[in-house]
Image: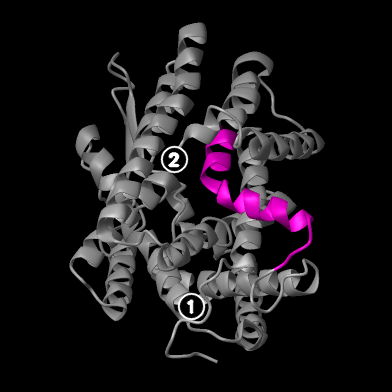
Amino acid sequence: MFNKDEVNTQRQAFLDLAKAIIIIVMIVDHTFMYGGAEMNEGLIRAFDYILAGSLGAPVFMTCMGIGMAYSRRSDAASMARRGLRLLIVSYILNLVRGFAPLLGWVITGDRGMLVLFSYALTLVDILQLAGLSFLLMALLRRMKVSMGWILCLSLVMSLAGSLVADGSGWLVERTHTGIVAVDAIIALFAGTITPAVGSESGIIPLYVFSCFPLLNWFVFVAFGYWGGKLIRRCGDLDRLFAWTTPVSALMFITLSIIAWSGDTFMKIYTIEEGFYYMNIVDMFLITMPGIVMVFGVCHYICRRFAGITATGEGGKRWFELVRRTSMDLNRIYLTQWIIIIYAIAAPINLIFEKSMSIVQLLMSAMVIIVLSIWLARKRPMSLIKM
């Protein structure tokens, strides 16, 4: 099944499909979140925690790792340049998102809007994680670190992140210092939440929040990079996924049900402080099998319904949209946030002051999906290189 030589170096259709499906899931989830849906109730809770949670960003980061293994520009310098571009774009996006609550403060005088403004400015989101991951991989490539040691490092980082997660770490209960500038840097690497400093003193309240710290999340990039190296040497993906998909699906579904019934599922995300990142145990037991399951199902769909051949060639006309969506993933991600913040969140908080119904949210999500995919290929979004 695996060859000594690389025999599978073409673009992988199942990865394109996985990324296209997950970006749709994430747009729906973000629309729910910022449209005022009750995220902790019923089917929305299950959608948010299981589909968008354990199968959302982890699939993205794993695909990014596989992409590193397949990229023609995988030298240290190219990776470092891409990492810097992603970091710059990530903080520009923070500024764009932060302008809405700043405008809200100007209009309403509500100092709570300033807390949201500082939250948006210092937020460590998935683009910051992607940028740091590229920079770290560039360093490891420059040092000629082997694949085995990269995996070991990522596991040590994941364990360290579980030990020091702010408010729920196994070893350290607090990582924030209360100094906003310092915490904004710590938040890039470890799960950190700084309370709104200055909210009672008449100065602008500052607030730091980390959703995707490098320590906890780099393991998905390393796992993808390792997996990408294996896939390049795999001469029979049908056979590979024939046994990995049912095994991983059984693990993911069974353990998710057990964790859900015991009301412990969200310990994956240390929900006590509202964080969104993995601890090492749940990452191995639930999330990694879930990622393999998604890849296997997408491979089956590509082979059975999309007309993709065993060599990755061909594909029905509708699959070209899937490929383009996958290629435009980062620009779609940027576009959907701009639309959601200014067309959903801002009107709800500043004008209507009430949440949208589920039907309205679903209809809005569908419109945002179409607009994001379309606008990502138009100027000025098409000019953004990441």
Residue 237: x percent and y percent? 61, 82
Residue 248: x percent and y percent? 60, 80
Which residue is under mark 2?
Answer: 385
- Secondary structure at badge 1 equals helix
- Which corner quadrant holds the N terminus? bottom right
Nearer the observer, 239 or 313: 313
Query: Which amino acid does the dot numbered 1 rest on?
Result: Arg
Residue 103: x percent and y percent? 48, 13
Query: Which amino acid does the dot numbered 2 rest on?
Result: Lys
- Which corner quadrant holds the C terminus? top left
Say if mark 1 contacts mark 2, CB within 8 Å: no
Residue 236: x percent and y percent? 61, 86
| Residue span colored magenta | 314-337
Residue 126 on the magenta span: no
Q: Residue at x 65, y 69 (%)?
A: 261
Which residue is under mark 1?
Answer: 232
Whether 201 is drawn above or below 260: the answer is above
Nearer the observer, 277 or 312: 312
